[in-house]
Structures are given as C-alpha cells and as structure tokens.
Amino acid sequence: MSKPFVAILMGSDSDLPTMEAAFDVLEKFGIDYEVKVTSAHRTPENTHNYVVDADKRGCAAFICAAGMAAHLAGAVSATTLKPVIGVPINASLDGLDALLSTVQMPGGIPVATVAIGKAGAKNAAYLAAQIIGVSDATMHQKLVDERRANAEAIIAKDAELQKRLQERKAK
Amino acid sequence: MSKPFVAILMGSDSDLPTMEAAFDVLEKFGIDYEVKVTSAHRTPENTHNYVVDADKRGCAAFICAAGMAAHLAGAVSATTLKPVIGVPINASLDGLDALLSTVQMPGGIPVATVAIGKAGAKNAAYLAAQIIGVSDATMHQKLVDERRANAEAIIAKDAELQKRLQERKAK
Amino acid sequence: MSKPFVAILMGSDSDLPTMEAAFDVLEKFGIDYEVKVTSAHRTPENTHNYVVDADKRGCAAFICAAGMAAHLAGAVSATTLKPVIGVPINASLDGLDALLSTVQMPGGIPVATVAIGKAGAKNAAYLAAQIIGVSDATMHQKLVDERRANAEAIIAKDAELQKRLQERKAK
Amino acid sequence: MSKPFVAILMGSDSDLPTMEAAFDVLEKFGIDYEVKVTSAHRTPENTHNYVVDADKRGCAAFICAAGMAAHLAGAVSATTLKPVIGVPINASLDGLDALLSTVQMPGGIPVATVAIGKAGAKNAAYLAAQIIGVSDATMHQKLVDERRANAEAIIAKDAELQKRLQERKAK
Amino acid sequence: MSKPFVAILMGSDSDLPTMEAAFDVLEKFGIDYEVKVTSAHRTPENTHNYVVDADKRGCAAFICAAGMAAHLAGAVSATTLKPVIGVPINASLDGLDALLSTVQMPGGIPVATVAIGKAGAKNAAYLAAQIIGVSDATMHQKLVDERRANAEAIIAKDAELQKRLQERKAK
Amino acid sequence: MSKPFVAILMGSDSDLPTMEAAFDVLEKFGIDYEVKVTSAHRTPENTHNYVVDADKRGCAAFICAAGMAAHLAGAVSATTLKPVIGVPINASLDGLDALLSTVQMPGGIPVATVAIGKAGAKNAAYLAAQIIGVSDATMHQKLVDERRANAEAIIAKDAELQKRLQERKAK
Amino acid sequence: MSKPFVAILMGSDSDLPTMEAAFDVLEKFGIDYEVKVTSAHRTPENTHNYVVDADKRGCAAFICAAGMAAHLAGAVSATTLKPVIGVPINASLDGLDALLSTVQMPGGIPVATVAIGKAGAKNAAYLAAQIIGVSDATMHQKLVDERRANAEAIIAKDAELQKRLQERKAK
Amino acid sequence: MSKPFVAILMGSDSDLPTMEAAFDVLEKFGIDYEVKVTSAHRTPENTHNYVVDADKRGCAAFICAAGMAAHLAGAVSATTLKPVIGVPINASLDGLDALLSTVQMPGGIPVATVAIGKAGAKNAAYLAAQIIGVSDATMHQKLVDERRANAEAIIAKDAELQKRLQERKAK
C-alpha cells in the first residue's frame, strides 16, 4: 500500500492563514498532505472530482475548512467514506454559524468537527495523525512522544512563571 | 413557454407535516408543484439530477426544507440559477442551526431564506408566487386579492374579540 | 413592458459601504437600480409612497438593508406583492438581532433573507438577478456565464496556491 | 381632559391568553383599556388608523404584543409620540427573536420593552399604570398600596413554607 | 407642582460616554435631569436613599444604565413606583447579559428596557420625554415637531445620496 | 462559636421543587439550614433584614435561587461578606437569562454560581458543605467519604449495565 | 494484531437510550464494542484506568457521550492518542453547553465532535467504522455498500411520497 | 493549623494578564497564594499531583482559569473537596464556551463560577477571601472594611461627576 496522505480543502484562500497551523503539525509528524482551494458551492464538480481522485490515491483523511454556512465538510463526507474532519472558520457570528453548519450533520454522514479557528486547524491535523496511527504503530509512537514534549513545554512555562512571581513578590 | 411550476425538496419525509403548509398556499394560487424527498448528503446525485431536470422543464423556483446542518438549499442553489428558497426546519436547537446553515451563504450562491418551520413553509410558497408574479400579471393580481382577504380575516377576528371583551366587561 | 429595475432601500446612510457590494453585482448584470435612504420608523410615509410608486413603475424586486430591530424589509413586504429581499446589517450583537428581525416573518408577508453584511448584500443582488431571469432568458444566461467565470476564478486561486505550497515545501 | 386609557394591540388572537394577564392588572387599578387584534404587516393601514385615532381620543400608553419578527410595537412607536410598551411573545426560539425585534429599536423611536410572555404582559400593565401615575397622584398611591399588598403575599407564602419545613423536619 | 425632572443613574462612570447621548436628547427638549454614579451592589444604601429622595422631589422617570449582570434598573424599580427605564451597557457578551438582566423582570416590578448601548441611551431620553408628554401638551408637541425634523434630516440624507449616485453612474 | 448553618433564599415558592435537591444534600451532611421565600424586588427590605440577621447568627453561606433577571444572589452578596452561592432557575430562555444575571457580577461583589436547575441546587449544597469543611475537618472527611460512595454507585451502575449488555448480545 | 474494537463511554446511564443508536450501527458493521458508564468527574481514576487498558488491548477509537459541562471526551483524549469521538448529550440548554464543552478543545488534544443527541450517536459509530476502514478494506467496502442502501431507502421513501401526493391531488 | 493559602491554576500562561487582577485582590487582603500554569488536558498528572499536594499543605480554595472547553476547574473539583472557583476566560465566542464548560457541572462536583474575564478574576479572589473569612474573623472584618472603602470610592467618583456636569451646564 502506498503511503497515506491527508487532503486539506478550503472554501476560500482567505482561510489559508488559519489553516497553516495544520500544515505545521502535519509536517512535524512527517505526514504528506495536499492543499486545495475549492468550494462546495462555487466549484462543486471540482470538489467532487478531487475528493473521488484523492480517495482512490490513498487519502487517509480529509480536512475541510469553511466559514459561514460551512457546507464543505458535509459535501466531502457525502462523497467519500474516509474520515472527514471539519474546521469551522470565524467569518461571522464569532464562527457559531460555521460550527453548527459543520457539526450538526444528519445520521449516516459524519463530520469529525474540531474547534473554531486556529485551535481547530491544529487539532484537525492531530486527529488526522491519530487516525493514521490506529494502524501505523510508528505514527502512534510519534504522537505519544510529541505529547510528552508538549507537556514538558507547559512545565517549562510554569517554571518561568514561578521566577516572575518571585520577582513580583520581591518588589 | 410551458406553465412554470415550483419544486419542493425535503431532506427527510419527517419534514412533510411542516411543508404541507406550503402545498396549501400553492394550491390556493393555482400553482403547479412537485415534491421530492431527497438529501444533499445521502442522495447527492439524485438531488443534482432532479434539479437539473426540473430546471430544464421550466421550474420557476425551488423550495428546499431541511433541519440541523441544513445544506439542501445551498446545494440546490449551487446547481441552478433559478431562485432557491430555504425553509429551516426545527430538528434541534430550536432550528437555529438550520437557520444559520441556510441563510449564511457565501457571495454568489444566494438562498432566499424564510422563517423557521410552518410560518416559513407558508412564506416560501408566497415568495414563489411573488417571483412568478413578477412577469405574470394574473398571478400578481391573485396575490393582491389574497392579501386583501387576509387582512379582512384579521379584521373579522378583531370584531369577534370586541364581542368577547364586552362580555368580559359585562360580567 | 418597460425594463424592470431593482429598488435598494437602506434604513441609514451608514449602511451604504456594505450595500455597495450589491451595486457592483447589479451593474455587472446590466440591471438598472435605484437607491433610497428611508426608514421604516422615522420616515414611514416616505417609505410607503416610494414603494407604491416604484412598484407601479415596474420595480421587479426590492432589496432592503437595516440593522438592529430591522423592520424595513418587513414593512416593504407589507406594502408590495413584489419579492422583497432582506439584508441584515451588523450594527449590534454581530447582526443576530437584524437577522432574526428580518427572517422570522409571520405567514403571508415573506422576506427573502440573505446573509448578514457584505456577503448578504452581494447575494441580494444575485437573487434579484435570478428573479428577473425567471422570465428573461438573456439575464438567466448571463447568470450561468458569470457562475462559470466565478468557478474559474477559484480554480485560478487554487493554481496559485499550489505554486506557493511547492515553494514552501522546497524550503 | 377626558380619563386616560390604555390601548392593547396584538399581532394575532393567539396572543390573547398571554395578554389577559395585562387585562387583570389594568382592571385591578381601574384603568380603562381597549384591545385590538391588528397586524403591523397584514393590516398596516388599520393599525395606523387605530393608533392615530386612539392617540387623539386620549390614549395614555400603547401596549403591543407580537411574536417572531415582532414589528408591531416599533410600527406603533413610529406613528405616535405616546409611550409604547412592547411585549415579546414566545412563538419560536423561546421568544428571543421577538425580544430582539422589539427592544433593539434605532434612536428616536423608543419601545419600552418588558419580559417575554406572561410576566411581560403583567409588567406592561404595571408600567402603563406607573406612566399614568406620573401626573395622577391617586393612581400613584394605588400602585404604592398594591406593591405593599404584593409584598405581604410573599411574606404569607414564606410563613406557609416555614410550616411545611417544620413538618418535613418533624418526620 | 414643581417642574418634573429625570434622574439618570449609572452603575459605573465608565458608562458616561454612552449615556451622554441621553443628556443631549433631554437638553434638546428642555428637560431637567440629574446624573448619579451609584451601584446596586456596591452602594445599595446610597442608591436607595437617592431614589427615595428624587422620587419625593418630583422625579418623573428614572433612567438606569448598567452592564454585565445589570441589576441597577431592577433595584430602582423595586424602590419607586415611578417609571424606570433600563439601558443595557455592552461590557461583555455584546451586552446580551445586560439586556437579559434588565428586561426579564418578574411580574410587578417593570423595567422599560431599551436597546443596548448608545441607541438605547438616546431612546431612554425620548421615552422619558414621552412619559412627561402624556400630561404635558407642550412637551408632547415638542416631540411631534422633533420627529418631523428628524424625518426631514433623513430625507436630506437621501437627497445627498441621489447626487452621489448620479456621479457614480456618470463615471 | 455556635454551629454554622446555611440559609437558602428563593425568589418564589415555585422554585421549591428544584431546591429540595439542596435540602437532601445538606441533610445528608447533617448541616442545619433555613429556607426563606423572599424577593430581591418585591420584598427587598425583608431580604435585607433576614440576611443581616442570619449573618449575625452565624450563617456560613447563603444559597440564592431565582429565575429570569435573577438579582437575588447579587442583592444578598451586596448585603453580606459571607460566601453567596447562586442557583439559576429555568423560568424562561432555558435559564440562560438567570445564569447570566447571576454569574456576570461586577468586581467586588462575587456570586459563586452553579449550574441551572436541579444539578445546580445539589451543587450549591455540596459547595456550602465544602466551605464549612475548610475549617471543619469532620465535615471535610464526610465529603471525602460521600464522594467515594458516590463513585461506587456509578461503578455499580456500570456493573448493572454490563449485565444488560451481555443479555443484549446473547439475543 | 487482534481485531480492533470501539469503546463507548457514558457519563451517566441516563445517556443509554441516546447511545443505543450507536450500538445498532456498530452491530450492523460487525464491529466489536464495549460500553462503560464512567464519569470524568465522579470516577476519574476508573475512567483513566479503563482507557489506558482499552488502549493497550487494541481499542481503535473511543466514543464519549456526556451532557452539560461535558468533559468526558476531553479527559479521554488527554489519556490516549487513539481518536476520541465526542457525542454532546442534551441535558440542558438544548445541548449547546455539551456541544461547546466537547468541541472547543485546545490545540494538541483533539475531540472529533459529532451532532447533539441521537444523530450524533449514530454518526459517532459511522465515524468509528470509517476510522477502522482507513486500514481495513473490507470494512471500507461495507461502508460503501451501506451508504448505497441508505440512499435507496430515501429513494423508496420518495416513491411512496409521490403516491400519497397523487392521492392528495386526486381528491 | 498552618496559615491557609489560595492556589491559582491557569490552563495557559496567556491567561496571566487577566488573572493578575486576582493577585492584586489577594495581596490587598494579605492572603498567601501560589500560581501554577498547568493544563487539565496537556499535563493532567501534574495538575492532579499539584492539587493533591496543595490540598494537604492547607490550601483553602482553588481558583482555576481556562478558556474554550474549560475543563480545568472541573478536573480540580474532581480531585479535591476544597472549594474550587472557576474563572471563564474569553478565548473564543466571547467566553460563552468557557462559561458553560465551567458552570454546568453535574451534581456532586461543584465549581463556584464567577464572571468571564477580569471581573471574574477579581471576584474569584474576593470569594476566596470570603471563604477564608467564614472561620477567620479578622479576614471577615478586612472584607467588611474594604467594601466600605470601595463604596466610598464610588461616592467620590459621583462627586467628581457632579462637578463635571455643572461645568457642562455652565457652558
């Protein structure tokens, strides 16, 4: 079997700055990814064709980012039986419209929805890595190691804080 | 040109009791209509083929009802350049999810959204009649007449209320 | 019959920057339009008289933009039987108040509501063009052509993105 | 000057059961009132004519109840310079749509908004009595007395509760 | 009877810039007003004493502005039987918390709630003027005249817009 | 020092069925409590006097339950420097109005807010027990023991579920 | 490698009727599953131990259902690097609290959130099947086949509707 | 018994600027406090160990600040039987997600929730001081004195305002 990859679809190129957080995470885990600007509404055929093709070429998971009445993830989930991850983008109403349009899918067409905006973009990539990790022990181990490093970073931040607090109290 | 008709699409047959309010209004105005249970997600191809065909056969407007992450109206609007009217159905969150998923469409793919539930079903039909009436003076006149009758019905209700109030005061 | 036109009403001249997005779309399709600053509450008589007059002069559709407790579209819909399109303006509460005041109309007085703000302003114009296009094959064809061009613009943006991504990977 | 009265307007006769709470309060204070079923959208002219006439005949305050995109209070406030009190009716979205449509009025056209539903219906009547009481010392005194009685009723309920609690503890 | 006046209470002096819109309107109508920074929670006794005193001195209406869990208007309404007008201030959650805390009063303790922020501050003053105008024909006439002037200002803005539009078209 | 007790205040006796969940928890921990129906708005003086008196008599914490524009907890917190726990009651808008009116208190007047309705009533009592437990080691130990029992109850429910699932699979 | 299974965790046994929709879907696809009533808050250790153990025994995905401040899915995601699917349960506020508590996870700890309630329960199972299907071609094919059957069921419902409509028109 | 202290936990060091408002209040009352950056999700073990240790060392109350799906306060409350105060941080959706994730705790695991953001940070510290004050008469007296000073500060602000208003009127 060829190496699995992740396909990232965006409804608009204005979603790019948010979604770059996903690129960084995928690169950290050495996961190949493709990025596509394509719209559920304005280029439905292109979206359909790309998803069918990516699915055949071994795409392990689709990440779909869209704002407002965000239908992209749902449309992709209607086209493929691979896991589809939805990232709601804040383009209006603090992203509540995108969140509800992404997560409230009817039975049979799931979208694995993550947080609104940048935190969601990151978590979409982590989730994709976890999905690949289910059958790829090396990837799973990378995730375990990265989480440990992540925890250590927080512990380091706390240590730094303790110093600053002592300075505050010393004043 | 053949007589224009209205196509009503529903994401689920559980939407039927709500949408019958639209049938009644269309029948009152003598407008032909078709009804189709079809899903943006579960039968996307069927939806697409039906819309393309109805469009060619002279459909003047599409009415699309769906609940939750309601993508049906948006998917239909992406397929046709005829006016598409969206009716948000209350299947969860009081229908707020369906309202936002229907109305917050990106530029270029409009959905003419009406109220959540039964009032929206009725107004979808009125709006379709108004759209036909733009170029059909007879239909427009029917709308003018019906509104007058409608107003008289309210005036009659008020007259009835005045009687009940006098009885209340007489007590 | 004289050439149909679109009437754009705004509750306040502060809505102008948002609504210019509608002017651009109407001009692109060669649709005549009139713009009127008039308020459902502060100049109700003026609003009424203008709508009655525009209706007689062949107005095909009204576009009404207002913020907060946005009653303008509803008041216009109560005056005319032509299709009325409502654009909720974000003046408070992220525009949620304007959206609900515009879309939740009672049965018999429809308002075709579009998205909050600029996307809605654009879509109001597209919707008006679609309404005219129901009986005007030339206009309908313009819409079909414009959508194709629109899709190509997205495809071009995607092509550009692919280049940038290759540069990113090359680093 | 003739005795002032209060005019109660309802968008629909289905609002009557809610609004009867207002009748009771007005009767308790011996305030004359008129009730009118009339719609801002379906019978705008009737609404207008009634308000102008009631205003001339000495109406001290208007109480307007409506649900959904509740424009009635705003339309009445645009017609008269007497105080207009708005009661949002819960017909959808828990009454949030009616609340925002009633309260978020633009500068210059105030609506004195009270709570959604029955509590609001009662308070609309209390507020009308307070407005009349500003220049009518007898009415003002009635309000002062009624509030005292009201407080005593709560104190009585508390006394009753203390008995029940002692019984509970005795078990 | 001495000349009636309006008392404006604010929970915090940070509400002052918003509430100055009320001062302007009251001055336009020649209504005397007092302004008090006092808190329902931090200076409850002061608030109580001021309200009792102002009431006795002939205060016709109280305007209360507060943000967050805005209890000021409710606390004042519990102290006086004069009309109390509540202005929700946006200090968090877009002012939704202040709106609900102000408007959702239980039966018997009404607060006449107006819009969130500056529009509400203005309308609180208009409403106070209308309340005074119920028994003061001169004040009522001032309101009628001012509204006419207000309408003319909008008509003038529309005239200006027509010029700008012709220039746009001339390009 | 006399034995500390908890004072439970309710805005209305209709809150009693919800608040009985708190009585049960307090009785389980052997904590004395008083219950008072009293309103921040309708009996402000009574509320004030009761709180001042209970405070002097050794009340350790106040639990205040109210719906709608729930000011009771805030008013009590303005009167005492003992911890005040607020329970939002669902009387409208799913209890969101009561939640925001209770929790969004300005700096200096804290209300320890718990969940809407029955879960909140229970947790108010647990929190009061924890507050007493800060300086009362026996109470603290009771809490530790009860939590363990509570955990065992869930484990027992899980054991029961496993049986039912095996029966389901056996079918 | 042993056959992968899915672990379903519920915060309370009252979530069982909702979650049975997930059991049905998993059984349809022949996926083994375990069900556990365990709470992030009341039995955190049990939850932790079960997740660590299930993870080791080859659990492919965790499905976590909880209402209110739904922390279960997040707590599980903090314990394992397997995909965690969150089902928000409607126990208050229409399930909005559970949705936000489940989906708005910070970067690094993803929860694949699905719709509130029964639709979400079903989709959690579909998503788990899709995750297993990424590396299990037989499972993937089952999903492809089931979707086709699903589409045919909708088409059958539509056929039935056409009959009913013809009867209606025949009347 | 050793002197009680307060432990402040933050999910991220980006919460520090908000939480410094709590430090200031605690220092004003001479309460010792510790500050810890630790995450319910990224460093659950550290969080657990710290809480258990602080509890043993005489921590009187925990203050936990977190944004988004804010689980920190709940996780701490599941670990200790000391009072836990939750401060929702605005990191998205105006802090509504953090508020609901913090306050809507299930029965048995209370979190004493305060306002979103800075006001909440302050009130968390006040609440902690009140909890300590329940059994520490000196601390209680400090709170009584501080509140009086606080009231005087508002009265001083009002005096200043009266001056500015006289200047305004003098113009």
Image (cartoon, coloured by chain):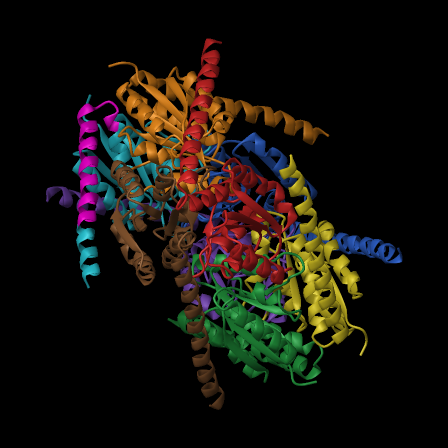
Chain colours: A green, B red, C brown, D orange, E cyan, F blue, G yellow, H purple
Residue B163 in view (yes/no): yes
User: Quick check: F52 left or right of B37?
Assistant: left
Query: Looking at the magenta stretch, what is its main secondary structure?
Result: helix
A105 is within the stretch colored magenta: no
Which percent across, then down, holds residue F114?
56, 48
E155 is within the stretch colored magenta: yes
What number of labels is visible? Answer: 0
Please identify the residue farthest to the top as the structure is shown: B170
Range of the magenta residues?
E132-159
Q: Residue B158: name its quadrant.
A: top left
Residue F81 in view (yes/no): no
Which percent across, then down, holds residue F26?
65, 42
User: Quick check: A144 left or right of D62?
Assistant: right
User: B10 or G30, which lies in front?
Assistant: B10
Residue at figure coordinates x 40%, y 19% from the top left: D145
User: H133 or D133, which lies in front?
Assistant: D133
Which percent across, then down, holds residue C41?
29, 38
Please identify the residue farthest to the bottom as the structure is shown: C170
Q: Quick check: G144 above or below D79?
A: below
Q: Quick check: C46 above or below E170?
A: above
Q: Residue E103: name its quadrant.
A: top left
User: B89 or H22, which lies in front?
Assistant: B89
Which percent across, then down, holds residue H149?
34, 48
Please identify the residue farthest to the right as the structure is shown: F170
Please identify the residue farthest to the left as the structure is shown: H171
Q: Residue E105: name its quadrant.
A: top left
